Image: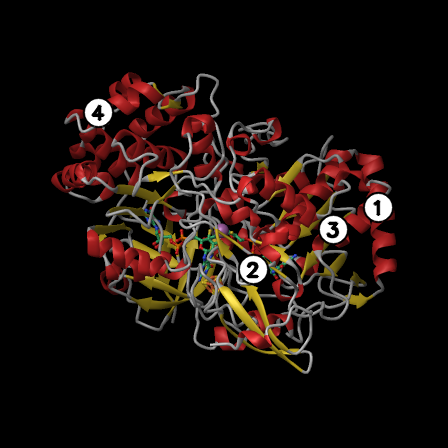
Amino acid sequence: MTDSTSITRVPGADGDHVTYCRICEALCGLIARVEGGKIVRILPDRANPHSRGHICVKGPALADVAYDPDRVTAPLKRIGGPGEFAAVSWDEALDEIAGRLSASIESHGANSFAVNAGNPPSMGWPSSLAAPFFQAAMGASRMYSPASEDISSVVLATELMFGTHAFLFPDLAECDHLLIFGSNPLVSHGSLVIAPRFKEDLDQIAKRGRVLVIDPRHTETARKHEHVPIIPGGDVWLIGAMLNTLIEENLIDSSFIAAHASGMNELAAAMEWLTPEVAAPRCGIAAETIRTMARDFAIAPRAAAMGRIGICRGEFATLTNLFVHMLNVIAGKFHRPGGYGWGHGGTASDTQYRGISPGARHGAIPSRVSGLPSVWGAQASVTFLEEMLTPGEGQIRSLLVVGANPVMSMPGGPDLPKGFAQLDLMVALDLYITETTRHADFVLPVTTALEREDINLFFMNHMVRPFAQHVDAVIPPVGDARMEFDILRDLAARMGRAEAFGKAAPFEMADAALRAGVEGRNGLSVERLRAAPHGMMIEGGRWDFDFTKRLGHADGKIHFWSEPIAAEIARLRQAPAWNPSSLRLINLRKLRSINSWMHNVEGLVRSDRASLLMHPDDAMARGIEDGGKAELSTSRGRIVVNVEISKEMLAGVVCYPHGWGHEGGWQRARATDGANLNMIAPAGPQSAERLSGMSNLEGFAVEVRALA
Ligand SMILES: Nc1nc2c(c(=O)[nH]1)N[C@H]1C(S)=C(S)[C@@H](COP(=O)(O)OP(=O)(O)OC[C@H]3O[C@@H](n4cnc5c(=O)[nH]c(N)nc54)[C@H](O)[C@@H]3O)O[C@H]1N2
Ligand SMILES: Nc1nc2c(c(=O)[nH]1)N[C@H]1C(S)=C(S)[C@@H](COP(=O)(O)OP(=O)(O)OC[C@H]3O[C@@H](n4cnc5c(=O)[nH]c(N)nc54)[C@H](O)[C@@H]3O)O[C@H]1N2
Ligand code: SF4
Ligand SMILES: [Mo]
């Protein structure tokens, strides 16, 4: 326990500083102890009423990142080949960038400029605003992000059914029967549903009722609960057949559907063929089990079904996510205690939820060459390279990368440098010289979470128990690092284009959002949060609002039927069966890693290793030994991987993490021996789901061969 009398708020002052982790969505409360101006320890903040002392190994490692000798702490300018940089002053860097970017945009047009914004900046408030504001300042429309490896399919499913992008999530606090499709919250700590004590929530649900984990791997979460093994990509069949059963056996909430939904009859007719018998061989689950799962779910009074990344990136990612939404609504689990629906946190308001801005609508900004749709304003990653390489109006000629590592995180990422080489200018804002930033003309140093004031604004509305926190910086910026927002506003000003950043500072905008939100009437404001450094629970009342005011379709209904839904169900019906002779690959998240960027922390990587998990029968059939090396290949190429034989895997399915196989200036990371999975993942515009532009990263065909 920390002694509250030693709490200080002055950045860099000795004593204990209250802060929170921004590595994953759990946003655990932290206490950073400063001595002699340096952080000497990071502890859990037991006084944080939301995380109540929960942290994982990665939280304390934020200090290792802050003080990492490999960290970029001065603006760097390229003086030679990739990775060859010299330190320059901020003025020199920003003036030269302003001049070159202005010239490039003047000769090639605003849409020759593109932004690639990554996951880490989206975890903070001012940092998440920086890239979109700069994009607007340039008048450019193309934004690349990890959305198409992460959330585009679920965002689109929500848009099609509800006419909004607000996230729907299960009420873990009161649920008694939870279905988890493709998520491993005991390792990931949850995504799009925020509960830092997810593990405890699941234990409580299991005590009251049941937790079913539908996953091809016997995961950490599956081991503690009821595991339903599934063939990768089988969820669309399983859930479709569960819907078919509910309709067939009339286990549907008819009065809710009559009042609030449209298209039920069309959907029912279109699902008639998708019986449990048809689905069973496609998902590897017996027809009777599918029926029982559907019935048990329907009759449980407080039940919810949630999905996450394991169902977001297969060949039918959007339809799978539509089916999860439909399962909840049709079985009568929507917007009720223990069920599934929107949150009611700090900034939630009917106006904020309702509708979608024109630029964020599905397909508003189609890709230039292949015409893949944008989702939520984001371009499909698989079009990035061709948009750099294909000549013509709108060819990407200048690029700003803010906290993204697409060479590691996008399918086909290792080919992106071919595109980077054609650019007039590439600027990156990052903590490290990475596989991506080593190709930039300038790398500009940014602050870590410990060096900035922040507020958990973006995350408030999908917390199981709404919570708000504002924190000050723990230490001043290390070296010459600056906040993304300040860097890009300064750069836009030097280009004479700062108006898009507006007059309001980020925390004034946050204050306005809080005051406009549901708790605004109760006096929630930044000032009030400043007075509660450990953060405060905000009792929005999860179901205490009129959900119909948030439905964005013109008819005010939840749509079960529309042209895209019809087309996807028809496409499913025609889908060829999987050839069982080839192996399928799924992705793995590990506790000590976060995507591609914490492998330079000795304490984390020492006992972490990228290995291909493989079922004993599959290994034996190929003469592969535990701990041996193997070649993992697809039609795109081959990588060498370590093999771990594991009964966790379903036979026929192998599993490997992304974010390994390092190059660049992070020396410890470079010494690790993994390989970049996105070198062999399906890439290029043909590989994506056409409807959402979602990358096909889950369950693709691979071959594995023993290496001597
Ligand atoms: N420690 C750690 N935590 C993280 C991250 C990290 O890198 N490390 N990354 C963060 C990020 S960016 C995100 S988006 C979240 C993601 O959060 P989660 O979605 O919980 O992430 P995963 O742990 O990858 O869980 C996905 C699960 O889906 C399973 N799966 C794969 N294919 C299928 C399938 O076809 N059907 C079904 N039913 N299951 C399938 C996988 O075996 C895996 O167990 O995690 C966040 N948290
Ligand atoms: N094959 C495969 N590919 C995947 C996934 C998968 O499961 N399998 N997962 C996908 C998912 S869900 C995601 S979210 C993406 C992640 O994709 P990205 O966001 O592109 O990659 P990250 O590894 O999160 O790292 C981004 C960069 O941010 C830097 N960084 C860290 N903190 C900060 C900061 O505060 N500010 C700034 N400016 N930079 C910072 C890091 O040094 C790193 O270079 O990967 C996706 N790609
Ligand atoms: S679970 Fe770990 S990485 Fe995620 S917020 Fe908490 S301490 Fe940070
Ligand atoms: Mo993600």
Q: Which of 171 and 579 lies nearest the eye of the viewer?
A: 171
Left-right relation of 19 to 242: right
Q: Is residue 478 visible?
A: yes
Left or right of 533, for residue 502: right
Q: Marks 2 and 1, Cα distance to the nearest angstrom?
A: 35 Å
Residue 186 image-quadrant placement: bottom left
Q: CA distance from mark 4 to mark 1?
A: 60 Å
SS at circle 2: loop
Q: Residue 205's x, y, as percent?
A: 25, 53
Between the C-alphas of marks 1 and 3, the distance is 19 Å
**Which of label 3 and label 2 is nearer to you?**
2
Where 200 falls versus 299 (above or below)?
A: below
Earlier-in-chain disc, 3 versus 4: 4
Mark nearer the N terminus (3 vs 2): 3
Residue sitting at x 58%, y 45%: 145
Q: Which mark is residue 426?
A: 3
Q: Which residue is mark 2?
A: 532
Mark 2 against mark 1, which lies toward the viewer?
A: 2
What amino acid is labelled 4 in the image? Trp
Q: Amino acid at mark 1?
A: Ala
Q: Amino acid at mark 3?
A: Met
SS label for mark 3 = strand
Question: If the picture is divided into quarters, which one holds ligand 2?
Answer: bottom right
Residue at numbered disc 4: 273
Q: Residues within 10 Å of mark 3 (few under 14, many from 20)?
A: many
Question: Which residue type carries mark 2?
Answer: Ala
In 3D space, how far apart are the residues under numbered discs 3 and 4 (Cα atoms)? 52 Å
The answer to the question of whether label 3 and label 4 lie on touching residues, with beta carbons closer than 8 A, is: no
Could you say whether the residue bearing mark 1 is in a helix, strand or loop?
A: helix
- Which label is found at residue 493? 1
Q: Is residue 689 above or below residue 560?
A: below
